[in-house]
């Protein structure tokens, strides 16, 4: 039975993991992002590398443990508790949207930094939340038994009911939320319960010249000298429970917070990263890797080239636009540069050939195994890929245009339902509340919107969207409208001349008047028409094919990963990341990714001054920081040789979502904050190479020096547990 095979396979996998940890090797880089409930099988190896804790100290549901100090920050980053009064650290780029939200030309916190000198000065943030994991429970056997024999729609219905029943069983009356999460393409399932806090306030952030020092130039590169951190505080009600923002809330008291070590790190020290890695794709077949390099990444990069050229020019033109488009530029540029490095790394490592070799070995072994149950797995995946790739490309283009392109499209979509149903809504008792919510949304939109920039984005991106769209999924009606103009810029100029959604003030005035005829006329606004056409085309022609083919691929890949573990018992095949709590471990170490090249593991404040270029967008510094750096008064944050260490690299396997993760030493103390990977590591989501893959972390001593010495916010350091 499938249930018995999965259980037996999982047991064999764990036993094998236990076997391989006996001989301790010099190889430091450790592939894999480990589910914390399974750390017992890794405990011996981790302790041999320098861990002085037990697996139970790291993850426990019976007493406080390190996991209780790890925070899922706003669903996309990680953060860590550093005091008993709710104080947390995350990355500057993780808190960037909140810093921007509070910034203006008069109070430019992005440029100048922000520090609350009392709790009364800490700034609330709408929609920001922080989540703690309560429990991770393996329910694989229960689910496999309950679902055996079901197929198709009946399987989906039974699964939905079963998952809901399991969540209810573990969360009823607890104040927790939960979900059942599939791991390893559905080979395993874990129940995850959590507690989420909604009052999270900005406490401090360094100037962007510190938090983003190096900018796009240094992004994904080593050596690095970026103070990529920001400081927030979680607030709770008087019973220490989650609460929406209220002035009466008090600082949250976590069951554990990290002691902060200023003893420092050196080459060879044990480190571990505890956080919420987003996603990896380690089990793509050779044709899928070839598609990433040859088609998908070039297409995505080209779309973002258009956006970045426009946004970067706008930001350089005025302080207002620099603030308004700061967050959008950051979100676009980060993945853009990663994709460039990823393609380069996959080519350098001959990733396609490595995948082909693995697939050939898989096929040879499968012939002799258990009646050939895995014989057709790879061909099934690759046949589905051939059908899937056009849908995947079309979906990617839709996302790039609608969610990373001109803001007017989604802005118009937010009003579409209200406009279509205005007669009914205007007579309902909820009318005033609904209208005020839309007006508030419109005002927030206006704060970071510029019609001239948005017009350029539409003119450039819609053409690229049409150019790259697979012929079989081409949107003819949208193309006819676009090509009726000589250029994309002419199309966009006419579009914005006829739309009201590029003018938030006019839109608000029209909505407040509440005249039925004028509001219904908005249904013919070009922004409403275009977003409707784009969404209709996507959901009619793309979404179903994308989902159905992806489902086939995931099912076949589940068999593939099972087969890999059964056919290659001498090898370890880690489970892909899926935005759940994971632990990865390694050491502080440099690398030699290319012939004749060596990277040291640590960078120092000397490198900041060496990179400093007055007036340069990426390498300028505030004059007072230059003075402090030249003075070199590092105090208790100096290393043994009198330097201020700024960043360091390690051999911890990380990905997106690990941004802001605590870097923890062998004693469970915070020594840094993870924020990036090296250029030579950007392909590690698909192919991990232990000789070159390195994560980049800001040293906690630099963080504290900036807070304490440069910002004069020593009261924040005083509430931490400092280990000298």
Image (cartoon, rainbow, N blue to C red):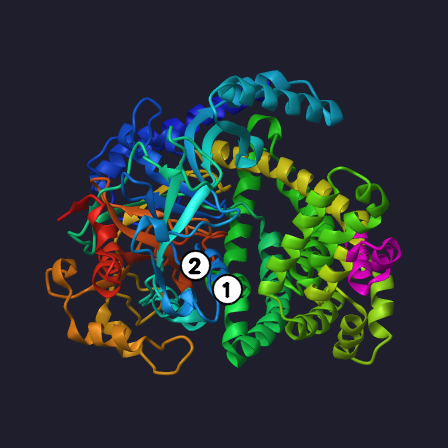
For residue 548, what is the image quadrant?
top right
| Neighbours of disc 2 within 10 Å: few (<14), some (14-19), many (20+) | many
Residue 5 image offset from top left, x and y in percent = 54, 22
**Is residue 272 part of the magenta span, yes or no?**
no
* Relative to 603, 89 lies left or right: right
Give me the residue at 48% from left, 62% from top. Answer: 100
Which residue in the structure is indicated by mark 1? Answer: 330
Most common SS among magenta residues: helix
Residue 592 image offset from top left, x and y in percent = 31, 64
Near-viewer residue (613 or 674)? 613
Tell me whether the residue at label 2 lies in contact with that at label 1, contact meaning CB atoms closer than 8 angstroms: yes
Magenta region: 513-536
Q: Earlier in the sequence, mark 2 or mark 1?
A: 2
Q: How many marks?
A: 2
Estimate the spatial distance between the alpha carbons at disc 2 and disc 1, rounded to whole Å: 8 Å
Compared to 11, does 333 lie above or below? below
The local secondary structure at tag 1 comes to helix
* Relative to 510, 240 lies left or right: left
Which residue in the structure is indicated by mark 2? Answer: 93
Report whether residue 59 is seen: yes
Compared to 191, does 535 lie above or below? below
For residue 448, what is the image quadrant?
bottom right
| Quadrant containing the N terminus in the rendered view | top right
Residue 241 image offset from top left, x and y in percent = 41, 30
Residue 316 image offset from top left, x and y in percent = 51, 79
Give me the residue at 79% from left, 58% from top. Answer: 528
* Relative to 321, 707 lies left or right: left
Near-viewer residue (209 or 99)? 99
């Amino acid at each position: 039975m499938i249930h018995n095979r999965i259980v037996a396979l999982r047991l064999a996998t764990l036993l094998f993991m236990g076997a391989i940890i006996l001989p301790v090797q010099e190889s430091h880089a450790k592939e894999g992002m480990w589910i914390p409930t399974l750390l017992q099988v890794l405990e011996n190896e981790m302790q041999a590398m320098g861990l002085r804790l037990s697996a139970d100290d790291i993850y426990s549901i019976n007493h406080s443990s390190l996991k209780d100090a790890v925070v899922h920050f706003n669903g996309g980053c990680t953060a860590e508790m550093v005091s008993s009064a709710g104080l947390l650290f995350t990355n500057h780029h993780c808190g960037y949207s909140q810093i921007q939200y509070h910034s203006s030309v008069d109070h430019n916190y992005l440029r100048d930094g922000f520090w609350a000198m009392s709790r009364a000065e800490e700034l609330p943030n709408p929609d920001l939340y922080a989540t703690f994991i309560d429990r991770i429970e393996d329910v694989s056997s229960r689910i496999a038994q309950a679902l055996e024999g079901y197929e198709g729609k009946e399987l989906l219905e039974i699964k939905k009911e079963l998952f809901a029943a399991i969540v209810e069983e573990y969360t009823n009356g607890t104040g927790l939320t939960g979900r059942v999460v599939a791991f390893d393409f559905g080979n395993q399932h874990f129940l995850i319960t959590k507690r989420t806090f909604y009052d999270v306030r900005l406490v401090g952030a360094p100037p962007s010249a510190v938090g983003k020092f190096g900018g796009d130039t240094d992004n994904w590169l080593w050596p690095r000298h970026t103070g990529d951190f920001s400081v927030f505080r979680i607030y709770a009600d008087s019973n220490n429970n989650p609460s929406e923002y209220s002035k009466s809330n008090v600082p949250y008291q976590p069951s554990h917070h990290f002691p902060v070590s200023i003893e420092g790190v050196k080459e060879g020290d044990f480190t571990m990263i505890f956080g919420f890695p987003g996603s990896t794709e380690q089990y793509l077949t050779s044709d899928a890797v070839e598609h990433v390099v040859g088609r998908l990444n070039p297409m995505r990069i080209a779309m973002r080239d258009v956006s970045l050229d426009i946004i970067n020019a706008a930001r350089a033109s005025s302080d207002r636009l620099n603030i308004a488009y700061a967050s959008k530029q950051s979100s676009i540029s980060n993945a853009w540069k990663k994709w460039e490095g990823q393609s380069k790394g996959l080519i350098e490592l001959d990733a396609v050939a490595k995948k082909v070799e693995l697939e050939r070995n898989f096929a040879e072994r499968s012939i002799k195994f258990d009646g050939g149950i895995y014989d057709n797995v790879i061909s099934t995946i690759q046949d589905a890929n051939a059908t899937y790739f056009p849908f995947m490309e079309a979906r990617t283009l839709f996302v790039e245009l609608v969610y990373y392109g001109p803001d007017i499209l989604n802005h118009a979509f937010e009003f579409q339902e209200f406009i279509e149903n205005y007669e009914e809504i205007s007579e309902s008792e909820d009318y005033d509340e609904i209208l005020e919510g839309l007006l508030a949304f419109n005002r927030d939109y206006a704060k970071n919107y510029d019609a001239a920039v948005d017009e350029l984005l539409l003119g450039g991106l819609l053409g690229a969207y049409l150019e790259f769209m697979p012929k079989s999924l081409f949107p003819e009606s949208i193309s006819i409208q676009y090509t009726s103009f000589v250029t994309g810029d002419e199309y966009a100029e006419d579009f914005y001349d006829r739309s009201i959604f590029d003018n938030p003030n006019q839109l608000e005035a029209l909505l407040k008047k509440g005249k039925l005829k004028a509001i219904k006329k908005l249904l013919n606004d070009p922004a409403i028409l275009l977003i409707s056409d784009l969404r209709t085309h996507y959901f009619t022609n793309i979404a179903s094919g994308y989902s159905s083919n992806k489902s086939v691929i995931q099912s076949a890949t589940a068999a593939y990963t099972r087969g890999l573990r059964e056919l290659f018992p001498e090898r370890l095949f880690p489970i892909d990341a899926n935005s759940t709590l994971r632990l990865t471990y390694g050491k502080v170490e440099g690398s030699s990714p290319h012939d004749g090249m060596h990277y040291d593991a640590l960078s120092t404040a000397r490198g900041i001054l060496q990179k400093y270029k007055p007036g340069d967008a990426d390498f300028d510094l505030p004059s007072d920081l230059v003075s402090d750096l030249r003075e070199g008064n590092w105090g208790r944050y100096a290393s043994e040789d009198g330097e201020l260490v700024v960043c360091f690299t390690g051999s911890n396997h990380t990905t997106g979502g690990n941004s802001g993760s605590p870097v923890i030493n062998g004693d469970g103390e915070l020594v840094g904050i993870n924020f990036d990977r090296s250029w030579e590591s950007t392909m590690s989501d698909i192919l991990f190479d232990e000789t070159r893959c390195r994560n980049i972390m800001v040293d906690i001593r630099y963080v504290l020096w900036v807070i304490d010495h440069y910002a004069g916010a020593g009261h924040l350091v005083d509430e931490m547990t400092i280990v000298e």
